[in-house]
Image (cartoon, helix red, strand yellow):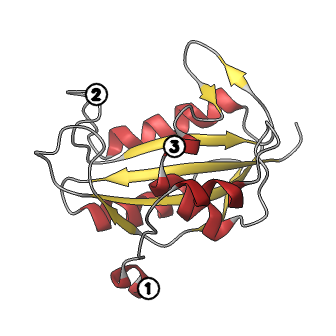
């Protein structure tokens, strides 16, 4: 199989979220037949769902992988389980959430996986860190990633603490 570039969104708002995301970057780098190519800064953001939960730490990783999309998904879910992810409520608090944003230029719609990620274009906490590590990226539908930032009325500020990792 040919090597595929994939982008993964990382998010956490429980149990030392900064450390959860930093550790997850290291774990992504350990996935078989996969290399961590780039990682964005960390960004603090308000929760999307219920507001009675802590703010999130979000980031994006760029991977080069020889795994099939569902094999990579299995690895992402394995890492989430290491972090004791529990799906108690939709958009609820998470120790770690790993979402496959893109898998090459493929469009995938299966029972287990939808790529590009359905919320990719609407979430500044995904678009901005993705733009940071892939400024020339064009989505499978032809949308230039840079053009998506124009729709948001705010820009996120990277956390200083990430630099010390």
**Which residue is drawn at the image coordinates 24% and 54% (left, top)?**
13
Point out the tag, 2 or 3, that comes first from the N-terminus: 2
Category of crowding for the residue at label 2, using alpha-carbon neighbours closer than 10 angstroms: few (below 14), some (14–19), many (at least 20): few
Find the residue positioned furthest to the left. 52
Image position, residue 118 (x, y; %): 56, 31
Secondary-structure class at tag 1 = helix
The residue lying toward the viewer, choosing from 3 and 116, is 116
Instruction: Report which quarter residue 70 is drawn in.
Output: top right
**Up-down: is 88 above or below 109?**
below
Choose mark 1 or mark 2, whichever is in front.
2
Mark number displayed over residue 163:
1
Secondary-structure class at tag 3 = helix
The residue lying toward the viewer, choosing from 17 and 107, is 107
Q: Are marks 3 and 1 in contact (CB under 8 Å)?
A: no
Image position, residue 79 (x, y; %): 43, 44
List the residue tagged with mark 3: 122
Choose mark 2 or mark 3, whichever is in front.
3
Secondary-structure class at tag 2 = loop
Category of crowding for the residue at label 3, using alpha-carbon neighbours closer than 10 angstroms: few (below 14), some (14–19), many (at least 20): few
Image position, residue 30 (x, y; %): 56, 56
Quadrant of the drawing holding the N terminus: top right
Q: How far apart are marks 2 and 3 (CA)?
A: 17 Å
Quadrant of the drawing holding the C terminus: bottom left
Q: Are marks 1 and 2 in contact (CB under 8 Å)?
A: no
**Up-down: is 88 above or below 4?**
above
Point out the tag, 3 or 1, that comes first from the N-terminus: 3
Mark number displayed over residue 19:
none
**How many marks do you count on the picture?**
3
Choose mark 3 or mark 1, whichever is in front.
3
Residue 38 appears in view = no
**Which residue is drawn at the image coordinates 28% and 27% (left, top)?**
90
Mark number displayed over residue 90:
2
């Amino acid at each position: 199989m040919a090597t595929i570039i994939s982008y993964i969104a990382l998010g956490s708002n429980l149990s030392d979220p900064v450390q959860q995301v930093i550790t997850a970057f290291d774990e992504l780098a350990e996935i078989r037949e996969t290399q961590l190519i780039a990682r964005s800064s960390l960004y603090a953001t308000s929760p999307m769902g219920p507001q009675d939960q802590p703010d999130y730490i979000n980031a994006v990783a760029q991977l080069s992988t020889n795994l099939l999309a569902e094999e990579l998904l299995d690895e992402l879910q394995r890492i989430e389980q290491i972090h004791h992810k529990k799906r108690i409520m939709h958009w609820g608090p998470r120790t770690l959430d790993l979402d496959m944003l893109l898998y090459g230029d493929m469009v995938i719609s299966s029972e287990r996986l939808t790529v590009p990620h359905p919320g990719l274009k609407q979430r500044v906490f995904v678009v901005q860190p993705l733009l940071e590590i892939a400024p020339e990226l064009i989505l499978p539908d032809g949308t230039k990633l840079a053009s998506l930032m124009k729709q948001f009325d705010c820009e996120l500020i990277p956390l200083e603490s990430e630099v010390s990792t």
